[in-house]
Image (cartoon, helix red, strand yellow):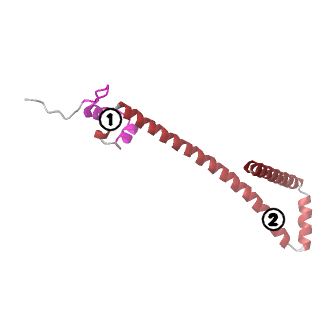
Amino acid sequence: MEELTTERKQTSNTNITLNNIYNGIKKLKPEYQKIILGYKLPDLYLLFENNTEYQKYLKELIDNATIYINTFGALIALHKEALEESKRTQEFDILDTMNEVYDSLPEDKKIEFCENMLSKKEFFVDAYKRMMDTFESAIDTQKCEAVEGVAEN
């Protein structure tokens, strides 16, 4: 009696069968098994059958991985910049709030406030540094905009 076989030999230089794939899955690490379970056995067989298509598929996976890695890096960088920007905005909001509070004080309280502030040298040194940093940042921004404007013309 002739033996019935459902396995087909590959046309490439390998002889991988469905049984080889099935048995190979059992020997993979559990984390790899979970990934492979997303594929159907016949699809894996067809993938391995043609070496050129298999290499092409692997290249597509690498290209997609690169996109995800770049996206990952871009999101982390954006998050960092957004946090720094929120801190800068917060610092300026505090100064604006202090101005509003000061302006709403009666004259005698304004004098008392100024006397108390003058006794805190570190506060003024820090405020001066922040103002100078803000001015320098504004000058750099204006220079960049001017250079971009010239480059566009």
122 or 78, which lies in front? Answer: 78
Residue beneath disc 2: 98
Q: Residue at x 74, y 48 (%)?
A: 151
Specify start and end residues of the magenta stretch as a single range: 9-37
Q: Residue at x 89, y 60 (%)?
A: 117
82 or 43, which lies in front? Answer: 43
**Looking at the picture, how far across and down is residue 142, in whole percent?**
79, 53
61 or 127, which lies in front? Answer: 61
The kind of residue tagged 2 is Met
| View extreme (front): residue | 153
Residue beneath disc 1: 25
Q: Is residue 20 shown above or below 143?
A: above
**Looking at the picture, how far across and down is residue 26, in whole percent?**
31, 34
SS at badge 1: helix
The kind of residue tagged 1 is Ile
95 or 113, which lies in front? Answer: 95
Classify 10 Å Cα crowding around label 1: few (below 14), some (14-19), many (20 and above): some
Q: Using the image, tell me which numbered label, if any, was put on residue 151.
A: none
- Quadrant of res 61: top left
Q: Residue at x 32, y 35 (%)?
A: 25
| View extreme (bottom): residue | 106
Of the two numbered discs 1 and 2 on the same chain, state the one appearing first in sequence: 1
Q: Residue at x 41, y 35 (%)?
A: 56
Asked if the stretch drawn in magenta spans residue 44, the answer is: no
Asked if the stretch drawn in magenta spans residue 33, the answer is: yes
**Looking at the picture, how far across and down is residue 19, in whole percent?**
25, 33
**Looking at the picture, how far across and down is residue 3, in whole percent?**
12, 30
In screen coordinates, is 78 left or right of 22? Answer: right
Q: CA distance from mark 1 to mark 2?
A: 67 Å
